[in-house]
Image (cartoon, grey):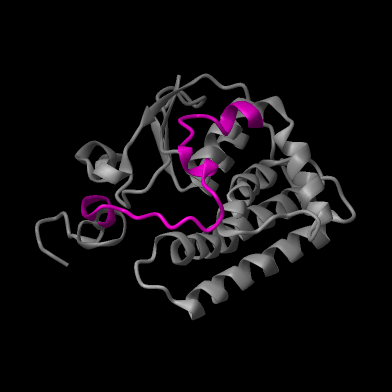
Amino acid sequence: MLELHTVPTPNGHKISIALEELALPYRVIEYDISKGEQFSPELLALNPNNKLPVLRDPQPASGNEPITVFETGAILIYLAEKTGRLLAASGPERYAQLQWLMFQMSAVGPLQGQAHHYVRYARVKQDYAQQRYLQETLRQCRVLDTQLAEQEYIAGAFSIADIALWPWLRALPLIGIELAPRFPHLARWFAQLAARPAFERGKDVINGWVYELPPNFFMELDETTWSYSFGEEQYRDRRGAQS
């Protein structure tokens, strides 16, 4: 059985949704990042970058030693290739799906993550930073809306690219962005995926209450949680020296 080391974030839900879509048996190992569990020796042995989720396959199809994969793009490719589903085997369709997966990994996740930080977590209000990342988020939505104007899914057939994008767009209302009516094709796509049973199950794996918060709700973190997420503990050199 696969092991999913995870947290209730858009990145975590990418993988639980994919596992549900592929009907793969898995068990969840939950971490509380507000308590610094992402820095445990056990997780650092799986991912030296101390980020979640991480997938461990104790019995890969090759029959080799257990395989551990971190970074959600790599995990999604691994699962697709393990099952022969959700990623074209070759040709233009494969590269279309991979390029939109990389768009999520390199642009949507990192830049929308910054929008969430400056709107919902930053202790010092920074108008320029908020507007910079909110405008980039809206630009990305326009790109996706244009792409979806002429096709049902982001890269032709339903694929891991759709799965990678959906959880991040689910979080947009938290920073005051609604898809409809501004982005009608993107809103149609989002609702269509939300209605899939696997998405309904996967999005609720250790689901956090955070998705129920009102738009632009400022998260007042205590000193310990702040330190583990954005402060001294986040940047401490765990080899023994202080960064």
Instruction: Please report the residue visible at 54 percent of the width from the left and 32 percent of the height from the top.
Output: 16
- Residue range (magenta): 199-226
Q: Is 208 inside the magenta-drawn segment?
A: yes
- Where 158 falls versus 106 (above or below)? above
Instruction: Please report the residue visible at 10 percent of the width from the left and 62 percent of the height from the top.
Output: 241
Whole-percent x and y of residue 19? 57, 29
In-image side of 29 versus 78 (left or right):
left
Residue sticking out furthest to the left: 240
* Residue 44 visible to the viewer: no
Nearest to the observer: residue 171 or residue 10: 171
Whole-percent x and y of residue 171? 58, 49
- Where 234 falls versus 130 (above or below)? above
* Residue 111 visible to the viewer: yes
- Where 95 falls versus 117 (above or below)? above
Residue sticking out furthest to the right: 150
In-image side of 80 versus 65 (left or right):
right
Q: Is 157 inside the magenta-drawn segment?
A: no
Residue 70 occupies quadrant: top left
What is the number of callouts on the image?
0
Nearest to the observer: residue 151 or residue 96: 151
Residue sticking out furthest to the bottom: 128
Residue 106 occupies quadrant: bottom right
In-image side of 84 versus 53 (left or right):
right
| Quadrant location, the N terminus | top left
Nearest to the observer: residue 41 or residue 69: 41
Whole-percent x and y of residue 179? 73, 54
